[in-house]
Amino acid sequence: MFIDAPPNFERSGVVAGFILGPGSDLTPVLSRGVLFAQGAIYRPAAAPALPAAPAARQSWLFFNFQSGFYWAAAPVATAPDDALLGWALADAARVIAVSRQRIFVPDPKENITVIPLGPVLAQAAGGPSFGDTAPPPEPSFGTNASGRGVLEIAGLAFLTLENTRSIGSATFRIFYRDETGAASGDLAADVDAAAAIFPVSNGAGFSAGGLYLLDAEIVQVTAINGNNLSVARARL
């Protein structure tokens, strides 16, 4: 990952900005970036030694300002102030994929915006080195409605590369509410935040499996018993 420019204000903990490269065998390289830790500045040529990535697994690289770099089996730091620099995926002999992440510098209000770790293509010397054996992990993404009926989807990412090799496209299912249409029905009584049964004035106006907007909450009807709806709360 990389940082656009060094921070220009005091900040506790660690701010990092590196690009990890595959390097040779199981030892990635720091190919670009600057790391600021408790007043000290580290660059790739002068950074503490980067240990070899564990073989045959995905590992997350952290930096501790006292002990230096270390690998973890999960994206969880040993100490709260340790910086997550990225991850590397290795087979039995070499690193086959690494992450990239951009950390933006403060704006005039000294805010920092972080884009989560994004997907990369796992490549070895002869091409992709592993196949998919199950559905991919749940993706994350952001949306933006820019007006005139345009919906932008960006920042698609996976936390891990497992079972993502064959992904070439994605299908989005979009739900919308016709604001010019009439309401499906009315509640016959008040419900609280824990209620799983909604009494309504006319159950015939609803359908099992349908999504309905109640104030600012979207619920899904799982079953209909007369004028009582069984619902799953906070579906979206």
Image (cartoon, rainbow, N blue to C red):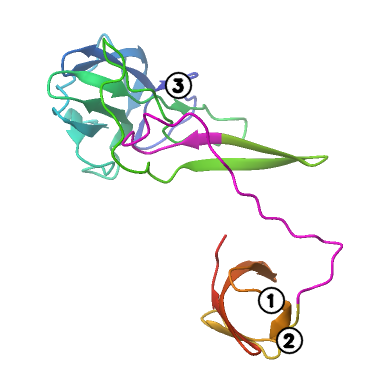
Residue 113 included in the magenta stretch of the image: no
Q: Residue 48: x percent and y percent?
A: 19, 19
Res 68 seen here:
yes
49 on left or right of 196: left
Q: Residue at x 60, y 49 (%)?
A: 173
**Residue in the foreground of this view, choosing between 68 and 99:** 99
Element class at badge 2: loop
Res 110 seen here:
no
Circle 1: is it few (<14), some (14-19), or many (20+) Cα within 10 Å?
some
Q: Quarter-wise, where is residue 119 in the image?
A: top left
Q: Are marks 3 and 2 in contact (CB under 8 Å)?
A: no
Distance CA(mark 1)–CA(mark 3): 51 Å
Picture disc at residue 206: 1
Q: Residue 202: x percent and y percent?
A: 73, 86
Which range of residues does the magenta coloring cover?
155-184
Q: Quarter-wise, where is residue 87 in the image?
A: top left
**Residue in the foreground of this view, choosing between 111 and 28:** 28
Q: Residue furthest right?
A: 180
Q: Nearer the N terminus, badge 3 or badge 2?
A: 3
Distance CA(mark 2)–CA(mark 1): 8 Å
Amino acid carrying label 3: it is Ile
Single out the mark in the foreground, 3 or 2: 2
Task: Name above or below for residue 197 compared with residue 214.
Answer: below
Amino acid carrying label 1: it is Phe
Q: Label 2: which residue? A: 202
Dominant SS of magenta comes to: loop
Distance CA(mark 3)–CA(mark 2): 57 Å
Picture disc at residue 3: 3
